[in-house]
Image: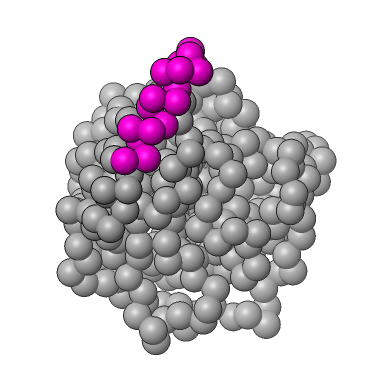
Amino acid sequence: MDPSPTRRRTLQLGGTALVAGLAGCLGDDQPEGTLDFDGLDRLNESSLPSRQNYRTDERPFPTYRRYDADDANIVLILLHTAVFDSRILQPLATAISETGVAHVVTPDLRGHGPNPNTRGDLSYIGQFQDDLRQLIDSVDLMYPDANLVIGGHGTGGGIVVDFAAPPTGSLADGYLLLAPYLGPDAPTTRQALGGWANFYGDRIVMLRVLTGFGLDDYSGMTTVEFDVPQSARDGTETLEHTYRLMASYTPDEGAVNEMVDVPTLTVAGTADVTIDAAAYEPLFADRETARVELLDGVSHLDTVLGDDAVGPIVDWLRALRKSL
């Protein structure tokens, strides 16, 4: 329930003072290192599918890339991780579609990509999930007889975990999670995502309180920055996220337990510095339809840029196709 106008005004004034005091504060997690970005040279811009728009409630309409397979009856919507856009999924999406097991659709998440309306920001908390629901409507028109799998890498996986709870969870026939970000307090999450992210801890706590009271006035403040070396940048990276964008890819604690009971594959590399790969198995241990695949020596970005994840994903999709 929204607070009364008087109480809302009091909260706004108090919030202004508190946020002003926190405006210059950095979080508890200072970057101490970075990811291995060497795999980015595997991207082939010349062979990328063109970006297309899909219709949503708000303009500008988001974009996606489409990798068609021959005679597939599964379509995989695959969400990219933080900082980058759908291009980073090219090696994995191409490899999956070329096996013929699934069509792959890779959207550019709002606030990301070469030309976002507002880089690193959304209009409201939960807009990623609303966009995904409307992308599904478009995918249903493109592939009317196909079964649907929704997947995500890193923070894209966090969006998927949130989406996989009722009532939207039943819209998919399966879920694919690639080193998913499950929130700051999850046992799978390493501090500062292994030195890649700088979270403004105090500011996040205060904004969580304010938005809990229905006060979204300050949710456009930056709450996380990402450390990407200059050598790995091309000017399209999204290096800062607002609170409302960050909150939209951060599942609630225990969100895995809220996911609908459909086949789920979680893939994570043991050399991934952003997460503790072994910690995923206990989280999914009680779910009969869930499986966890650990890739020895594979890093966070190589989960989608390399070849190691292709085999387990394709095998799982083939088994899923037989069961549907």
Q: Which residue is drawn at 39% across and 25% down?
A: 10
Q: Residue at x 26, y 72 (%)?
A: 34
58 left or right of 169 in image: right
Q: Position of residue 2 (x, y in %)?
A: 49, 16
Would you place residue 90 above or below residue 320 in this image? below
Q: Give the range drawn in magenta.
A: 1-17
Which residue occupies 18% across, 69% down?
32
User: In the rendered view, would you say 171 is above or below 64?
Assistant: above
Side of 190 where 161 appears, left or right:
right
In the image, is 63 to the left or to the right of 40?
right
Measured from the top left, where is residue 95 in percent x and y?
56, 65
Does residue 310 appear in this view?
Answer: yes
79 part of magenta stretch: no
> Which residue lies most toward the bottom here?
231
Query: Magenta stretch mostly in which secondary structure?
Result: helix
**Quadrant where the C terminus is found in the figure:** top right
Is 16 one of the magenta-colored residues? yes
Residue at position x 56%, y 48% in the image = 122
* Residue 148 visible within the image: no
Q: Position of residue 196 (x, y in %)?
A: 29, 65
Which sits in the foreground, 173 or 22? 22
- Between 119 and 317, which is closer to the camera in this rendering? 119
Q: Nearer the viewer, residue 165 or 90?
A: 165
